[in-house]
Image (spheres, rainbow, N blue to C red):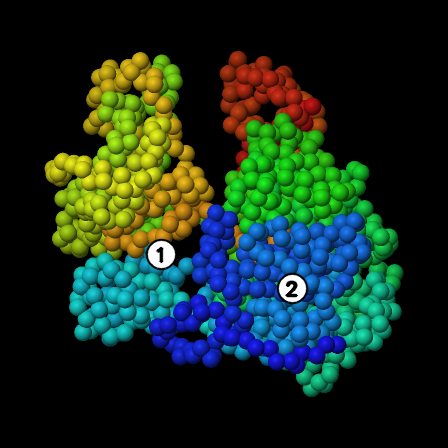
Amino acid sequence: MVNFDSHYSVIHFYDMFTQNINNMTDYAITTDQVAFIEQPTTPQDIDEGLYSRMLYVMGKEAMHALSGSHVLISGMRGLGVEIAKNIVLGGVKSVTIQDCNKVTHADLSSQYFFTEEDIGKNRAEISQKKLAELNSYVEVTHSSEKLNPQYLESRKINVFVLTEALLDEQKDVGEYCHKHNIKLVICNTKGLFGQIFCDFGENFLVLDTNGENPLMQIVTEISNDNPGVVFLSFDKRHGFEDGSYVTFSGVKGMTEVNGKEFKIGVPSPYTLTIDDTSSFGAYAGGGTVTEVKKPEILQFKSFSQSLTEPDMLICDFAKMYMPGNLHVAFQALCAYKIKYGEPPKPWDDNDAEKFYELAKEINCKTPDKPITDELNKHVMHLFSKTCTGDLCPMQAVIGGIAAQEVMKAVTGKFKPIKQFFYFDAIECLPENIFNPPSTDSTITISPIEAPSIKLANKNSRYYSQAIVFGDEFQQRLGESKYFVVGSGAIGCEMLKNFAMMGIGCQKNGAIYVTDMDSIEKSNLNRQFLFRQWNIGQMKSKVAAEAVKQMNSDVNIHAFIERVASETEHMYDSNFFNQLDGVVNALDNVAARQYIDQRCVYYRKTLVDSGTLGTKASVQVVIPHITESYSSTTDPPDPSIAMCTLKHFPFLIEHSIEWARDYFEGAFTNPIKLAKEYQKNPKEFLDRVQKLTAYQKQDEINTVQRILGPDRPKSFPDCIKWAKEVFQVQFYNTIVQLLFNFPHDQVTSTGDRFWSGNKRCPHEIQFDVENKLHMDFIYTASNLCAAMYSIPQNRDRTQIKNHVATIQLPTFTPKHGVTILDDDEQMKAANENRDHGDDENGTIELPELLQKLPKLEDILDVKLNPVEFEKDDDTNFHIDFITAASNLRAENYEITPAERSKTKQISGRIIPAIATTTAMVTGLVCLEVYKFFQKHKNIESYRNAFVNLSLPFFGLSEPVPPKKSKFLDKEFTLWDRFEVETDMTLEELIEYFKREHKIVITMLATGMTVIYSRHFMKNPDKAQDMHKKISELYATNIKAEIPSHVKALVLDVLCDDLEGNDIEDVPYINYKFR
């Protein structure tokens, strides 16, 4: 035992915290009250190309805090390296990994940076080399010294992560860290059980408790009352909570509220109350109300105090008794090792009983106040029998969560675990083991009921996993065939877990992985199988090679073809029928739904997972037991109304979306159209002649504009073009809008036209000295040059001097210009226009064709469609959209957005962080264990929704499939009629009459109708009754059926034998080959 009583000097925590508590109205916080840790070094500049996805999770301030922090991690087995990996990817200043022990075979089941060649070498030394490769910005050092006060005093430490420690050492470290204001995270995994403890000091400041963007709503009215009533848009509920704080901006008339902070009441979902406004000016329109997020101070107890007075976070509400039991069990394990000199032996009943007796003693140290009133003998026995096991998925779950807690400790971003978190996955054991028939908690399973655990050789790399599941189970894993769809962030973690678990590692086993994407710099922050030198290479190929290095036994096959209808010749029935299961690692709903459809058809287990920043979800799909992924769908993201986007934006998201659309409409689509004409005028004209009158005119005018004589031919022409665009979009258009709808316009009901969501705009006069104006000219002129293959100019001074000389004619608004202010009217007008009902529809095609340039005049014009690319900071794309959207925001008095926010919205970037990804793949792989156990009860499986920022853990049973009924038979989406031979149509109809008592009235596959009873009245169709179904299908599609297609999915309409319509029946799986 070490003594941690020496003095350890500390100084104030990061300056960022004190800067963020200025102007707090509800907190009188002094610097003495704020938690202190060793001051981080000067933060580094953030490499946005590398950290872009993580920046959208943590924010720049938190990333700067991370980049100046120092973390010590003790213990480099599977859990320690998982935490270290996630923290290094996260971009701290330095990570020191400490371990005095050497690599053994027992480490290989979860420590993916160890190989058989490393056995006998120091764990920390071997791990350091691999961890250092993950992020060149992070200094990774190793130590094999023993932990003692002198060791800690010699190092800058902001956070201490302790793994693999005995209870007495945990207590000593806990007291030392609590006394010296070092943030402490203690983590352990024992078989199927995990533990996390956090102590961030007696006054820890949480700057952002939930990670959500502040709520913002449009003000429609504010009364002059006490209290003042704020009326908001009735389009949707405002979401504000009673007692929270808000500020106002842009309010006209009642300007006294602008910039002031108010505590609010919430009398209804569409109104707020604030302070007395009776003496304020009368509300005259406009304004937004925005939530003010308040910091929160948390008090943490030391580890020793928390042992006797535990605060525990619940993760599985179906097992409310479990945290208390595991709080006892982890202490009992340490007591067992001290009393008996070794841990309990795997699946030993005698040791399990001795363990239970110790657990009872610990639970009742204070008889009148036991740790838990529900000490479960069965849980204690399972813990004893499996605690020496070591499982990679468990390390992924606990390691991902713990690493996020480390980031919270140094940034104050998100609410930490307070203070113990216990997690278990006992459902991964056989169902008769983890859930025996008896409900009496004092009765445990007998030796006869215990699983037949034949432990693997101790020199096997899977020994620590086989301790939990046995050698036969390990054999099943090795002989299995699994398909991982996607090898991005989730895919990389999944492949790592599979390699450690031994999936596909026997002679007949295999892992298949596919991904059509190549590696980009932004991937390296969380897709840890890739390195800087892999940029540009195919993800699946590199990932396969990387996991092969982790476990040379893995049989992995990498593809670069997407899984879709057009590749069913590759991923055919032979491919899917051999599989034991599929895991999704996809980032879009359409692809997930397609994989789900394939898994339902081939009756394969599927686990789907996804992340959004610190949020993650897991859904298990099991044939005949659960619903499928596609059984329920999230509501579509709300779209922006056309009139809002075009004329009446009121949020920065609207102006960014407008700018993104303008980019495509200016630099991409018109150039593609002109190139089509330039390449083959005849084919272009043949296509155009089939369009409506409006579409003909629009496309021909576009080609004429792009290729006509007035097109830009030099860079000065591009500058002029850019200024003309500025004039049209930010001056002329607004002047015309205000001409149609003046500032004092009222509606037919007497209300102000410019009120509520309609913000009255103002025009912008170009100013060469205005940086934003010049940003637009600079980026637009260079993009114009790019689309005409004109050499670009990056000299802003030259561009500024030239644009100052360009004079444009003064714009005068026109009478008779129609501007629709209602979305329904705009939709109707667009539909009429697209169908040819337009005032321009009278223009004849010959007249339009005369506008097109002659081919010989444009042969030397080199056009280059500018395809939007968000991750190249040198291509002007995001810079143009930022300038354009912020100018439009200025038009409408909307708060502008920083470049990073513009990039996220315009690039549809999904926030992502390595911690969440690691955690969610661990949850997925725990479900995969259950598939191999062949669980039959839906209660054995878990769907999950997790939000690490709150933190919230929601584990729940999956939803069973919906049952339907025809005649007296129930069926679900997993059921179907099976036909094993190619029949004639007449034979098939008679077969279903005879075998299923139904009369087929229609057969179809996809959009192809093969048979309809109504059609048979036609004499020409009567002969179809004697043709094979496959022949009828081939005739309908006018092609031979591809050789890889072995079966058709036939959808059926039918009656019963009495002629009554049957609403719903299963489909027919028609195998004709």
Residue 703 spot, x, y in % from top left: 30, 24
Q: Which residue is more in the foreground, 1019 or 253?
A: 253
Where is the C terminus found, in terms of image quarters? top right
Front residue of 728/878: it is 878
Question: On screen, 906 above or below 570?
Answer: below
Q: Which residue is mark 1?
A: 236
Of the pair 539 and 852, the residue shown nearer to us = 539
* Residue 1037 vertical position relative to residue 240 in the rendered view, above or below: above
Viewer-side residue, 966 vs 262: 262
Name the residue at 61% across, 69% down.
155
Q: Is residue 637 visible?
A: no
Question: What amino acid is at disc 1?
Answer: Lys
Which labelled disc corresponds to residue 459?
Answer: none
Within 10 angstroms of label 2, few (less than 14), some, or many (20 or more) residues?
Answer: many
Q: Which residue is mark 2?
A: 73
Q: Relative to 1030, is 783 on the left or the right? A: left
Give left or right: position of 714 versus 931.
Answer: left
Marked residue nearer the N-terminal end (1 or 2) = 2
Residue 719 appears at what percent x and percent y?
26, 35
